[in-house]
Image (tube, rainbow, N blue to C red):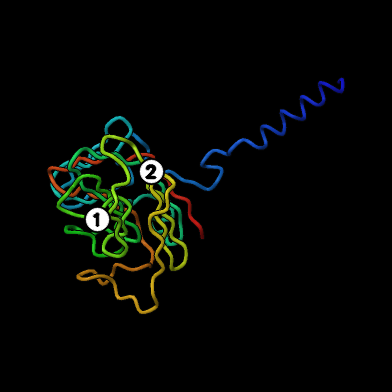
Amino acid sequence: MGIAMANLVSLLVLAVALMPLPAADQGWVSLFNGKDLDGWKANENPSTFSVQDGAIVAKGPRSHLFYVGPVRNANFKNFELKVDVMTLPGANGGIYIHTEYQDKGWPAKGFEIQVNNSYDKDPRRTGSLYEVQDVTEKLVPDNVWFTEHIVVKGDTIVVRVNDKEVVRWTQPPDWKGTRGFPARRIDSGTIALQGHDPGSTVYYKNILIRPLD
């Protein structure tokens, strides 16, 4: 092999080595297969959730869709979570963490990361750590896909919207939850998606988690 060819081979090897690894090779695991709701369980109004074009659609009466699949036995403590989301005008939704399945009502356990770009009845906008550290700025428009990136490590929760950090909150030692929700605290639990009301349509896809413990 000539010197020029050897240099070319070396450059190709280096280029391959520097290529980003697929998500699975970095510890990321998908919680949604893009085809059906296998591994997920809806509570009070199951018909609120469906799968269309590779996305979970939340449209209908209040309901919450809980991950109950095999990854970590649906129990996560320290992790990164990425979810691609799109809202239609007037939609309200959310992503719950450290929660657990319940038959009806707003999830009592864990935190909600808000999804709201134009639902004006609630001033808490997309990215809010609901009623804990709220965001009032409209960060993204309706009808456009965006990413919510949630990191939980130790006593700190970080929320990014399209790579912009909007929340960084550390739970105080004397934290007692929020009004009416004493179990809204860092613990461990599953992930849930919110269907808020019949007037809301929210799409969720590419639901990836990377355990950090």
Q: Residues within 10 Å of mark 1 (few under 14, many from 20)?
A: many
Residue that mark 2 sits on: 147
The percent position of residue 121, horizontal first and vertical second, equals 14, 52
Q: Which mark is residue 199?
A: none
Q: Is residue 203 visible?
A: no
Question: Is 168 on the left-hand or right-hand side of 23?
Answer: left
Q: Residue at x 33, y 75 (%)?
A: 175
Tell me: residue 35, above or below residue 64.
above
The percent position of residue 96, horizontal first and vertical second, equals 31, 55
Q: Residue at x 29, y 51 (%)?
A: 137
Tell me: residue 121, above or below residue 87.
below
Q: Residue at x 32, y 59 (%)?
A: 129
Q: Are marks 1 and 2 in contact (CB under 8 Å)?
A: no
Q: Amino acid at mark 1?
A: Arg
The percent position of residue 2, horizontal first and vertical second, equals 87, 20
Q: Is residue 86 visible?
A: yes
Residue that mark 1 sits on: 124
Q: Tell which residue pokes out farthest to the front in this image.
A: 137
Q: Residues within 10 Å of mark 2 (few under 14, many from 20)?
A: many
Q: Nearer the viewer, residue 204 or 31?
A: 204
The percent position of residue 71, horizontal first and vertical second, equals 42, 51
Distance between the alpha carbons at the discs numbered 1 and 2: 17 Å
First of labels 1, 2 by sequence position: 1
Q: Secondary structure at mark 1?
A: loop
- Residue 46: image quadrant is top left
